[in-house]
Amino acid sequence: MSDVISFRKAQFLISAPSLHQCPEDNGCEVAFAGRSNAGKSSAINALTNNAKLARTSKTPGRTQLLNFFSLSEHCRLVDLPGYGFAKVSKALKKEWDQHLAEYLQQRQSLKGLVLLMDIRHPLQEYDWQMIRWACQSQMPVHLLLTKADKFNHGPAKAILLKVQRELSEAGFWDNISIQTFSSLKKTGLEELEGILQDWLAVGQDAPTD
Ligand code: GDP
């Protein structure tokens, strides 16, 4: 039977600038992505209850492609830094794009992608790209509409439904779930944890080689 994962036990493992420098591709992991300022550090912080951990990914030198955190011996959380804040050349961004696509499409232990979008600016170009890459390899995607406290319940729900409609009109209805979330008010945390537990449980049950 699968263990329940405690996200509060997350510990920084390694920063990897490319697929080749990632930890061995066994066990299971879930990745978090989002444009910079989407609220990713705050969400990881709320989930793991560890402010130091979330800051880790913003430490110069660690703002690389993939930051790995261990949750248990075989489970990892992966932070894919939104590269809006990194002042890098177009050529380097293109190189990162290739590594990201490769990671999302080839990483066997990756069980799902959490994509964070500020509820006031959902479905920007970066988000579509991540959704396309993930869906091309049947990777489950869970969308977090962050900073939901900026709206009352009704308007927040209306945005959620609109995003769902746009996704479905664009042909994405399989393997995508969506919720509103607020790190500030700690709303949506249980729903997110439930999704992550499901993904990681499937990964733990699968044989590792
Ligand atoms: P990141 O760049 O995606 O890691 O985003 P951060 O977590 O650093 O958040 C970016 C900004 O949004 C900061 O000023 C946060 O205080 C703010 N923020 C993050 N989460 C929330 C939230 O749930 N509600 C509100 N109102 N602001 C938030």
Image (cartoon, grey):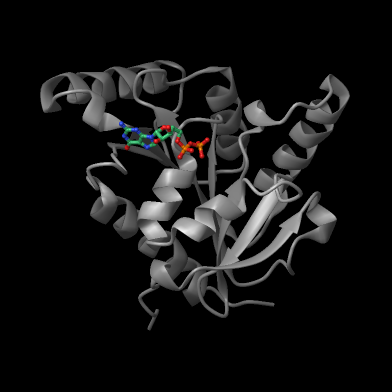
The number of callouts visible is: 0
Along the line of sight, the residue nearer the viewer: 157 or 51: 51
Along the line of sight, the residue nearer the viewer: 35 or 1: 35
Q: Quadrant of residue 48?
A: bottom left
Q: Residue at x 52, y 59 (%)?
A: 53
* Vertical comparison of 163 with 75: above or below: above
Q: Quadrant of the C terminus?
A: bottom right
Residue 169: image x %, image y %?
40, 16
Give the residue at the far bottom of this rendering: 1
Residue 195: image x %, image y %?
35, 55
* Vertical comparison of 71 with 85: above or below: below
* Vertical comparison of 154 with 183: above or below: above
Q: Quadrant of residue 26?
A: bottom right
Give the residue at the far right of this rendering: 91
| Residue 26 located left or right of residue 189 | right
Q: Residue at x 61, y 34 (%)?
A: 82
Along the line of sight, the residue nearer the viewer: 136 or 93: 93
Q: Residue at x 22, y 45 (%)?
A: 187
Residue 128: image x %, image y %?
54, 23
Q: Residue at x 84, y 33 (%)?
A: 95
Residue 106: image x %, image y %?
72, 50
Q: Quadrant of the N terminus?
A: bottom left
Quadrant of ligand 1 in image = top left
